[in-house]
Image (spheres, helix red, strand yellow):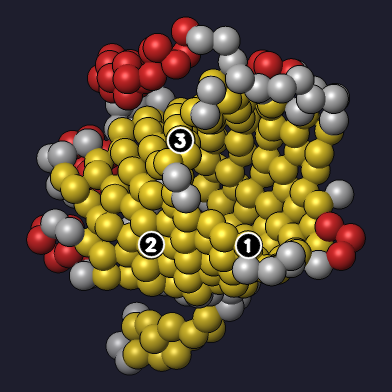
Amino acid sequence: MLKCLVVVIYMLAPFIFIFSQEPDVEDRSSSIWLYSESELNSKYIFRGIVLEDNYVYQPAVYAGYDGLGKAGSISAGVWLNFSMPKKQTLLNEESGEYEIQREPFSYNETDLYLMHEVTFKKLSVKNTFALYLFTTETGYPNTTEYILNLTYPAGQFNLLSEFSCDVSAYPGAYVFTHGIGWERDLTKELCFSSVVNLVWGGAKYNSVNAGLEKTLLNSAGTDVSVTYSHKGGFYTKMRYQYNRMLDGEIIQSYGYDTWCFGLLAGYNF
């Protein structure tokens, strides 16, 4: 836990001067917002690692309040993960022969999020507590993470930095994600966005997720999406995600690269 606090302070140190200034956020009228999304992905990839090599269905609901003025906004969300039906070739212990078996649609995971976001000058700071709840079948323990997101505009790009630290099942297991984002409106309804990022994990994080107890630059990746905004608050999105493992030992465990394709539909209430 002490390591997590030291790393958080280290990340925030360059921004002490900015934080000491008066927040440059205009007062916004009180408003409550709500939106829901449903996404179908060809795989479930989390920070470059494939957790489910099969089609997954991932619905979510988020709600927030923007009436805090210079104090920013607060929000909460619920995210679910389901495995779609799939066929597997498994060994029949009684006959000793391999058989094709069909696994049914199944529920795997619920994530609960509590978030606070505020802007100082141009720097956006987002604090999140994420609770991950897994079913027994997944083999993963329930746990909680603290996540710090920093976003800063630089010309046409956004500089992105995320620090995540487990505070429950694996306290002190941290991972960094640094990236550059770019977004452009192609038409009034159509928006293109892309993110290029690097992921590196601490020794404890890699020990838990990759079986390697050392700090590593784990992977490089890109996330490209096109969003179409329909009338009445409805929107659809196509997304492509690609990750390349950078460490030789991790490649032995998870392969050289991973990718997935997703289709999303959402609605702003």
Residue type highlighted by circle 2: Thr
Kindly identify which numbered label has been placed on residue 203.
none
Residue at image x 17%, y 64%? 251
> If you read the primary sequence from the N terminus, does the residue marked by circle 2 or circle 1 appear first?
1
Q: Between marks 3 and 1, how big is the CA–CA gap?
A: 19 Å
Q: Between marks 3 and 2, how big is the CA–CA gap?
A: 19 Å
Query: In this view of the protein, can residue 67 be seen by the observer?
Result: yes
Label 3: element kind: strand
> If you read the primary sequence from the N terminus, does the residue marked by circle 3 or circle 1 appear first?
3
Q: Position of residue 115 (x, y in %)?
A: 61, 30
Q: Between marks 2 and 1, how big is the CA–CA gap?
A: 19 Å
Query: In this view of the protein, can residue 41 be seen by the observer?
Result: no
Left or right, 109 with respect to 249, comes to: right
Mark 2 against mark 1, which lies toward the viewer? 1
Kindly identify which numbered label has been placed on residue 222.
2
Q: Which residue is mark 1?
A: 185
Label 1: element kind: strand
Residue type highlighted by circle 3: Tyr
Mark 3 crowdedness (10 Å alpha carbons): few <14, some 14-19, many ≥20: some
Label 2: element kind: strand
Residue 213 or residue 70, whichever sits in front: 70
Q: Position of residue 134 (x, y in %)?
A: 52, 47
Q: Position of residue 221 (x, y in %)?
A: 33, 60
Which residue lies most toward the right here? 232
Left or right, 262 with respect to 154, comes to: right
Q: Which residue is mark 3?
A: 152
Residue type highlighted by circle 1: Asp
Residue at image x 61%, y 38%? 112
Mark 1 crowdedness (10 Å alpha carbons): few <14, some 14-19, many ≥20: few
